[in-house]
Image: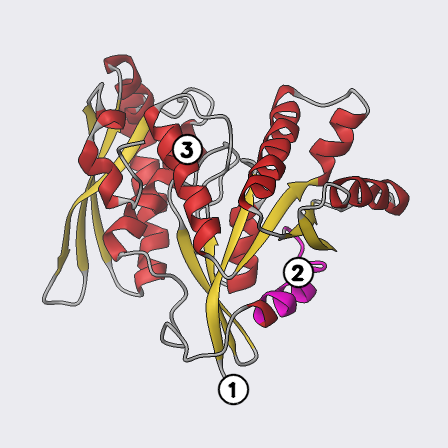
């Protein structure tokens, strides 16, 4: 009997949600960078385990929202959790332990606060989640068990898994459990499909990942990528035009780089990955535009499935 359904992966920014999604699916679905808040909308990856098809809702990190974009992302994350058949709360063990010993970085401290925010949110919603302790590599077992017990005692979890999304340890057990959570019924997607992102949106995400990999030091989150043209050519290739939006004129040279070298690198890396992803030749053209208000534009939110009116 086949089964199919949705499992939401929630967690603080940088808990490892995208890495876990990619590990479960066995393909690159969600973009992974070293900056927090790179996942802006629920990317659904499709994982297969036996007769079960698990549609993964890779929610944006749940954190304390300040701007409209933040609020839309948090609303989207909780929406994804509420509608799913199962919820996995991914927690960064290293951050929790470091803060517990008064050694954590500011990012670790924020992560611990975000975990508490999620626990409160789960209490309020009455949902039980699976607790997945991530980044267990090199952590002593007794310290991990003490942390697991402390979190489990909050009463919002049905069970605990200890995993490393990066090297895969413990992930197969978690996947088998997810497969049991989804209801009986026909598969929702073709067997070979790994994600339901429209191609033009996926193309923008890949370029945005390359952008952040290259300029993450100089450029905070003041950039967006929009695919303005996606044209399938007669020879089987694809012509893609994209605009990179920044909020200030001073940010344009950061993306262009000396003699346009940075933009060239971003374009080349993105084109290489898109060629592999779409399995055909890709002609990619990038433009950089200054728009102070891109993060306040309604059309930007609808495209990526976020709610503008939060």
The location of residue 236, given as percent across then percent down, is 17, 67
> Crowding near pointer 3: few (<14 within 10 Å), some, many (20+)?
many
Q: Which residue is at a point 66% across and 62% down the rendered structure image?
A: 174
Q: Decide if residue 220 is on the left or right side of residue 115.
A: left
List the residue tagged with mark 3.
212
Which picture quadrant has residue 227?
top left
Q: Decide if residue 122 is on the left or right side of residue 237.
A: right
Q: Nearer the viewer, residue 158 or 275?
A: 158
List the residue tagged with mark 2.
171
Q: Which residue is at a point 39% across and 26% down the rendered structure image?
A: 221
How far is the residue under mark 2 from the one under mark 1?
A: 24 Å
Please report whichever mark, 1 or 3, sits nearer to the chain's N-terminal start: 1
Nearer the camera: disc 3 or disc 2: 2
Please report whichever mark, 3 or 2, sits nearer to the chain's N-terminal start: 2
Which picture quadrant has residue 186?
bottom left
Secondary element type, mark 1: loop
Magenta stretch contains residue 106: no
Q: Is residue 163 visible?
A: no
Span colored in magenta: 166-179
> Crowding near pointer 1: few (<14 within 10 Å), some, many (20+)?
few
The location of residue 125, given as percent across then percent down, is 53, 44
In the picture, the quarter occupied by the C terminus is top left
Which residue lies most toward the bottom here?
1
Nearer the camera: disc 1 or disc 3: 1
Which residue lies most toward the top here?
250
How far is the residue under mark 3 from the one under mark 2?
A: 27 Å
Secondary element type, mark 3: helix
List the residue tagged with mark 1.
1
Q: Nearer the viewer, residue 259 or 250?
A: 250
The location of residue 300, given as percent across then percent down, is 23, 36
């Amino acid at each position: 009997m086949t089964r199919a359904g949705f499992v939401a992966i929630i967690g603080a920014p940088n808990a490892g949600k995208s890495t876990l999604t990619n590990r479960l699916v066995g393909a690159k679905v969600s973009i992974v960078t070293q900056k927090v808040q790179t996942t802006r909308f629920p990317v659904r990856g499709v994982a297969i385990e036996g007769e079960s098809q698990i549609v993964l809702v890779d929610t944006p990190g749940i954190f304390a929202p300040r701007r409209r974009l933040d609020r839309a992302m948090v609303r989207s994350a909780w929406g994804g959790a509420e509608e799913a058949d199962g919820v996995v709360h991914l927690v960064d063990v290293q951050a929790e332990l470091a803060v517990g010993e008064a050694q954590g970085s500011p990012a670790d401290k924020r992560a611990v606060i975000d975990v508490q925010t999620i626990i409160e949110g789960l209490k309020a919603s009455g949902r039980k989640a699976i607790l997945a302790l991530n980044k267990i590599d090199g952590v002593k077992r007794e310290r991990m068990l003490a942390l697991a017990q402390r979190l489990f005692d909050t009463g919002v979890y049905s069970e605990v898994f200890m995993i490393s999304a990066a090297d895969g340890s413990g992930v197969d057990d978690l996947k088998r459990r997810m497969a049991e959570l989804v209801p009986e019924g026909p598969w929702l997607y073709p067997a070979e499909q790994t994600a339901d992102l429209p191609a033009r949106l996926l193309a923008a995400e890949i370029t945005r990942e390359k952008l952040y990999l290259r300029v993450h030091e100089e450029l905070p989150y003041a950039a967006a990528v929009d695919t303005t043209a996606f044209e399938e050519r007669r020879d089987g290739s694809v012509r893609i035009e994209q605009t990179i939006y920044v909020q200030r004129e001073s940010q344009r040279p950061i993306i262009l780089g000396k003699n346009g070298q940075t933009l060239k690198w971003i374009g080349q890396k993105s084109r290489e990955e898109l060629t592999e992803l779409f399995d055909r030749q890709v002609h990619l053209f990038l433009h950089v535009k200054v728009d102070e208000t891109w993060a306040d534009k309604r059309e930007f939110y609808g495209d990526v499935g976020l709610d503008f009116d939060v």
